[in-house]
């Protein structure tokens, strides 16, 4: 299955599967950025608007722009009551539709590995942020096993099926992120790992949330019902539940921030 088969055309399904994870990680990320209220922000690859909404609620921006290539995701983002005041528009991370030096801060949340040319995407963020402003991102540590759906992917591989990976998966490594930020001329570069945990009511809740969108949906689409049944049984066996049947496990992301030179 090709990498390009990953699509996000259902904002509601994405919200259930990845939006919750994104907010959990985003809370830690925004704490780490320690930026004041009243700034001009751009959320590049805003998707369903999970982090855009979090920024509006926490940082009270004077301007909040969300850019994404999926109109379906943007349509969902526009329904978020907590993101009132944010503008969501169709756009390309490698050609942002804004003047240079316009924003105080630019972020990419779980996006950089989907950008065909990550260096160009980081350069664009740096271009639209004013001197002294912040350019930051976080990405699942996919190659290091930190992806929330890594367990399902491992069991798919055990059955001879490869779930599609993002086209720029190498960009999720901390070393690669540092190279991208330095290559864009950013300074005062810092990195950190972000580890979060999420709980599900039961295995059914976990499975529905984890396989309803993106690469997981694409991988399962071509499988026979019996093969999916075997996959579910293998995954279930590796996810211990508590006495109430709840399942809790963690995920890990690599985060980076830097400053546009004055």
Image (cartoon, rainbow, N blue to C red):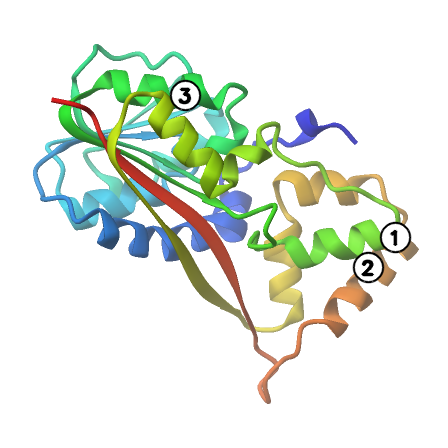
Dot 1 and dot 2 residues touching (CB under 8 Å): yes
Quadrant of the rendering where the N terminus is positioned: top right
Asked whether, in this view, residue 254 is left or right of residue 209, the answer is left
| Residue drawn at (12%, 43%) of the image | 60
Quick one: label 3 or label 2, which is nearer the N terminus? 3
Residue 102's spot in the image, x, y percent?
A: 16, 18
Asked whether, in this view, residue 244 is left or right of residue 97, the answer is right
Packing grade of label 2 (10 A; few <14, some 14-19, many >=20) is some
Q: Whole-Å distance between the Cαs marked 1 and 3?
A: 35 Å
Would you place residue 123 above or below residue 237 in this image? Answer: above
Packing grade of label 1 (10 A; few <14, some 14-19, many >=20) is few
| Residue drawn at (43%, 62%) of the image | 196
Q: Nearer the viewer, residue 109 or 145?
A: 145
Would you place residue 177 above or below residue 245 in this image? Answer: above
| Residue drawn at (49%, 29%) of the image | 72
Residue mark closest to the camera, 1 vs 3: 3
Q: Disc 3 on helix, strand or loop?
A: helix
User: Where, by quadrant of the figure, is residue 93 drawn?
Assistant: top left
| Residue drawn at (10%, 32%) of the image | 62
Quick one: label 1 or label 2, which is nearer the N terminus? 1
Residue 14's spot in the image, x, y percent?
A: 52, 44
The residue under label 1 is: 159
Residue 137's spot in the image, x, y percent?
A: 36, 38
Would you place residue 122 above or below residue 9 in this image? Answer: above
Asked whether, in this view, residue 6 is left or right of residue 97, the answer is right
Q: Disc 1 on helix, strand or loop?
A: loop
The residue under label 3 is: 121
Q: Whole-Å distance between the Cαs marked 1 and 2?
A: 8 Å
User: Where, by quadrant of the figure, is residue 50 drawn?
Assistant: top left
Badge number at residue 231? 2
In the rendered image, is residue 93 in sight? no
Q: Disc 2 on helix, strand or loop?
A: helix
């Amino acid at each position: 299955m090709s990498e390009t088969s990953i699509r996000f055309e259902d904002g509601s399904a994405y919200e259930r599967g990845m939006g919750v994870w994104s907010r959990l990680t985003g809370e830690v990320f925004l704490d780490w950025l320690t930026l004041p209220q009243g700034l001009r922000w751009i959320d590049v690859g805003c998707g369903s608007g999970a982090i855009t909404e979090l920024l509006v609620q926490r940082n009270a921006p004077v301007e909040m722009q969300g850019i994404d290539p999926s109109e379906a995701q943007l349509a969902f983002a526009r329904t978020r009551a907590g993101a009132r005041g944010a503008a969501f528009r169709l756009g390309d991370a490698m050609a942002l539709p804004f003047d240079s030096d316009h924003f105080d801060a630019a972020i990419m949340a779980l996006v950089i590995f989907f950008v065909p040319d990550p260096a160009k995407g980081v350069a664009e963020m740096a271009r639209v942020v004013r001197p002294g402003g912040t350019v930051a991102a976080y990405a699942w540590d996919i190659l290091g096993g930190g992806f929330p759906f890594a367990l399902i992917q491992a069991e798919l591989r055990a059955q001879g099926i490869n779930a599609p990976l993002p086209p720029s998966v190498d960009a999720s490594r901390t070393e690669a992120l540092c190279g991208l930020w330095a290559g864009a001329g950013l300074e005062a570069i810092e990195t950190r790992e972000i580890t979060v945990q999420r709980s599900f009511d039961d295995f059914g809740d976990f499975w529905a949330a984890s396989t309803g969108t993106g690469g997981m949906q694409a991988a399962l689409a071509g499988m026979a019902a019996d093969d999916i049944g075997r996959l579910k049984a293998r995954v279930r066996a590796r996810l211990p539940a508590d006495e109430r049947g709840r399942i809790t496990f963690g995920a890990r992301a690599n985060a980076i921030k830097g400053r546009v030179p004055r």
